[in-house]
Amino acid sequence: MRLQTTPLVLEYPRNGRDPSGRVLKMTTNCYWTNESVINDEGFSLIFAHCIGAHKEQWEPVIEQTFRTQQSKPKHHRVREAWAFDWQNHGDAALLNRDLLVNNRAYGVSAYEWGAAIASFVRSPRMQGRHIVAIGHSAGAGAMLVALKTIALPNIPYVSLVLVEPTMASPAMFYRHIADSVTAVVAATMMRRERWRSRDDAFAWLARRAPWKRWDKRVLRSFIEHGLVDTPDGDVTLKCDRRQEASAFPDVHPHFSAVNELTRICRDVPTHIVWASRSELVPRIVQDSLSDASEGRHVASITRLEGGHMIVQEAPDRIASAICSVLDAAAARVGVDCRARSRL
């Protein structure tokens, strides 16, 4: 299997504008094979990363998912996968640098990222696709707030996968998560962000938590795609640590995401993946997201060995969980397609 990559830069009016009227850009990679793109029965996967990450960190997950599904019937396979950069992360941070420095000291809200994702999934490019949305941590919330302006039964997702979602009701957040967020912001602002070279950065990160627990494929991706050369020959983070830190206190999108989950969960099968040592989301908060008495009915809950950064630590395990979701969705989509063909 030879996976192809097509990079794109997307601009949508809902991304947000600065006083001059310029629009923030969202960068994305489309992954596909020569065989997959002609399979109109296959799934279109969309991926949203966590705070401090970038779209390419999904690549080991995407590759393994393509590989696992390719020998299955056509309606189980992956047609294409799209991975998005938050507008102040990864390549998008470079394209939007002037806007971020001059007008966005407060960062880019997950609401704005969600609005850009919504514009993408509702665009002509994605019409008729069987879309499965996959988000990690804050990216899980972004996939849900993308649905805020879309009425039932017009939700464009056939399934939704939330990996270590950092969503919570206000009461749960302030009781069980707020102190951890304050600590993470402080740690982010003190973190090193500059190295002499990529080799120096790899050696430094590989010896320290949390990066030393990462799968080496993901760490190499971070070195290649998460860093940028400076004019004086060093390398630094594409996502400025001040922009990264600004995302953590932006909690209202995570509150809205819980409301969206409650609204859509009966129409869109929603699968939650938790890590065994979830450092940010206590078990009581996890259980609240699948509390049927609150109207949240999820299709499945999977618990995997790993920490909150499980996408980075164990991409093959995440791919296996996604493949199980695709197989379940394929059975349902196949029935719907056969029913429509008889009408």
Image (cartoon, rainbow, N blue to C red):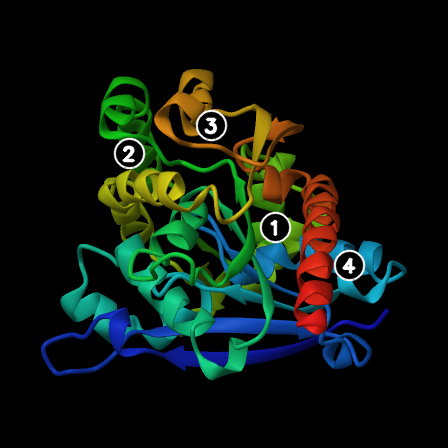
**Does residue 144 appear in the picture of this structure?**
yes
For residue 63, what is the image quadrant?
bottom right
Residue 330 shown left or right of residue 229 in the figure: right
Give me the residue at 69% from left, 64% from top: 339
Quarter location, residue 65:
bottom right
Which x, y percent locates residue 124?
Answer: 48, 83
Horizontal side of residue 251 vs 46, given as left or right: left
Image quadrant occupied by the C terminus: bottom right
Assign a secondary structure to mark 2: helix
Label 3 Cα crowd, 10 Å radius (few <14 / some 14-19 / many 20+)? many
User: Of the residues under marks 4 and 1, which one precedes in the sequence?
Assistant: 4
The alpha-carbon separation of the residues under discs 2 and 3 comes to: 31 Å
Q: Residue at x 26, y 72 (%)?
A: 14
Please report whichever mark, 1 or 3, sits nearer to the chain's N-terminal start: 1
Q: Which mark is residue 202?
A: 1
- Spatial distance from mark 4 to mark 2, Cα to Cα? 44 Å
Of marks 4 and 2, which one's residue comes earlier in the chain? 4
Q: Nearer the viewer, residue 219 or 160?
A: 160
- Which residue is disc 4 drawn over? 76
Against 313, residue 307 (above or below) is above
Residue annotated with mark 3: 290
The residue beneath circle 2 is 186
SS at mark 3?
Answer: loop
Query: For the point 73% across and 70% down, which residue is it?
Result: 41
N-terminal-most mark, 1 or 2: 2
Which corner quadrant of the image does residue 25 belong to? Answer: bottom left
Point out the frontmost of discs 4 and 2.
4
> Which numbered mark, 4 or 1, is in the foreground of this view?
4
Sequence-wise, which precedes: disc 3 or disc 4?
Answer: 4
Q: Amino acid at mark 1?
A: Phe
Q: Between tags 2 and 3, which lies in front?
A: 3
Badge 4: how crowded within 10 Å, few (<14), some, or many (20+)?
many
